[in-house]
Image (tube, rainbow, N blue to C red):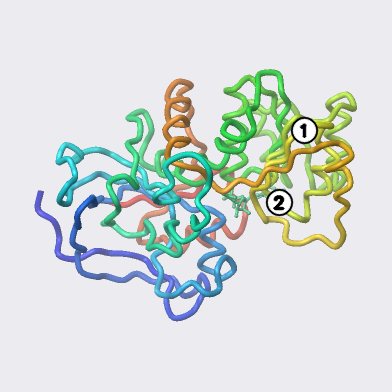
Amino acid sequence: MSLPDSVHAVVVDGSFGLQNLRHTTGPMPAVGPGHVLLKVRAASLNYRDLMMVRGEYNPRQPLPLVPLSDGVGEVVATGPGVDEAMVGTRVASLFAQGWYAGDIPGDVTKHTLGGPLSGMLANYVVLPADGVIAVPDYLSDAEAATLPCAALTAWSALVTHGAVRAGDTVLVQGTGGVSLFALQFATALGARVLATSSSDEKLVRTRKLGAWETINYREQPKWGKRARQLTGGRGVDHVVEVGGAGTLQQSLRAVRAGGTISMIGVLSGGADKLNVTPVLMQQIRVQGVFVGHRAGFSAMLRALEHHQIHPVVDRVFSFADAPKAFEHMAAQRHFGKVCIGFD
Ligand SMILES: NC(=O)c1ccc[n+]([C@@H]2O[C@H](COP(=O)([O-])OP(=O)(O)OC[C@H]3O[C@@H](n4cnc5c(N)ncnc54)[C@H](OP(=O)(O)O)[C@@H]3O)[C@@H](O)[C@H]2O)c1
């Protein structure tokens, strides 16, 4: 296959902000030892990418930066020491490069794509051969591109750390990427899902995806109490906490004694005052989750394929319209994943 001389990318440049996203071209990178060259077919956005571009995730991130941790592409060339049989394989990027299994490495945040490492919003990308993973054929390119961050985070929360079992009740907050994957995985595991959203229309859609009960958190700011009522006073077994400090009080109200809260996100901003006494008095397990490792990705792919789970793709923007995809996500009208397709 003959390769073009240049690579097209979108970068945030000059200073942070969605208005500073721009298209750029650069020379085709060399494929070094142990690396592969991907022709990127699709990428997806996470809330983290929005924060990264706005300078909220790491204000010291050097610019220009190619954003996005998540993408899928075809291996079109291999560097020295890599099996040439990888050429033609469709693979996804690994969010945390070099984390294969087991405990989280202390320096993990230095090895994540889309900041500080260059990300997937380019039509050709070079990555270590063990920094990508083959994806199942039944998924479309956009669907496969949603897996590296949001899906693996939900999987790590519920399976790797959470050990969710059939019959458990799992509460998911909102209808973004992580939460809808958590809904789908929990349902596949035989758990029942209590979904929350600011939109009744989105709640109807969560029921179609298998949610057992729903709560509009805007209409019911004390949704933790409502969740407890719905579970007959016992509380839910597991909360997928994507709101952070501003929602944790209600999560502590919703969760059963001895239950688990997976601390994942920061969507709600801060909290004025937080009473953490229930954590000790009710022996609640608060487990931090940072995406996950390669072994978890592999296990997740088996489960996805076995259950033929299709990620919920809200919309696919063209590469030319990539900056609009960030604006669409920032407006929080999406349901599931926002993606970018490459020609
Ligand atoms: N720790 C990790 O490894 C990890 C990995 C992935 C993501 N995250 C974090 O997890 C969070 C979710 O990420 P994402 O990519 O899934 O986001 P996303 O797709 O942008 O999700 C946005 C949705 O979250 C819901 N939401 C917003 N504020 C909320 C609140 N106060 N209470 C409940 N729901 C709220 C809204 O749903 P409705 O419109 O239905 O109300 C909104 O549409 C972010 O903070 C992200 O940084 C962390």
Answer yes or no: disc 2 within 8 Å of ligand 1: yes
Q: Quadrant of residue 143?
A: top left
**Direction from residue 170 to residue 41 in the image, left or right:** left
Q: Position of residue 184 (x, y in %)?
A: 58, 30
Q: Nearer the viewer, residue 276 or 30?
A: 276
Check the image and report above or below for 49 versus 65. above
Q: Quadrant of residue 82?
A: top left
In the image, what residue occupies the spot 49% across and 55% down?
108
Hey, which residue is sitting farthest left in the picture? Answer: 2
Q: Position of residue 204 (x, y in %)?
A: 68, 33
Q: Are marks 1 and 2 in contact (CB under 8 Å)?
A: no
- Can you tell which of label 1 and label 2 is closer to the viewer? 1
**Direction from residue 339 to residue 332 in the image, left or right:** right
In the image, what residue occupies the spot 40% across and 47% down?
94
In the image, what residue occupies the spot 77% across and 33% down?
259
**Direction from residue 118 to residue 178 in the image, left or right:** right
In the image, what residue occupies the spot 39% across and 59% down?
119
User: Residue beneath label 1, please?
Assistant: 259
Hey, which residue is sitting farthest bottom in the picture? Answer: 14
**Badge 2 amino acid:** Gly
Label 1 sits on a secondary structure element that is strand
Check the image and report above or below for 232 versus 99. above
Answer yes or no: disc 1 within 8 Å of ligand 1: no
User: Residue beneath label 2, please?
Assistant: 243
Q: Position of residue 278 (x, y in %)?
A: 87, 43
Q: Position of residue 11 (x, y in %)?
A: 39, 69
Label 2 sits on a secondary structure element that is loop
Q: Quadrant of residue 172?
A: top right
Residue 279 badge: none
Q: CA distance from mark 1 to mark 2?
A: 18 Å
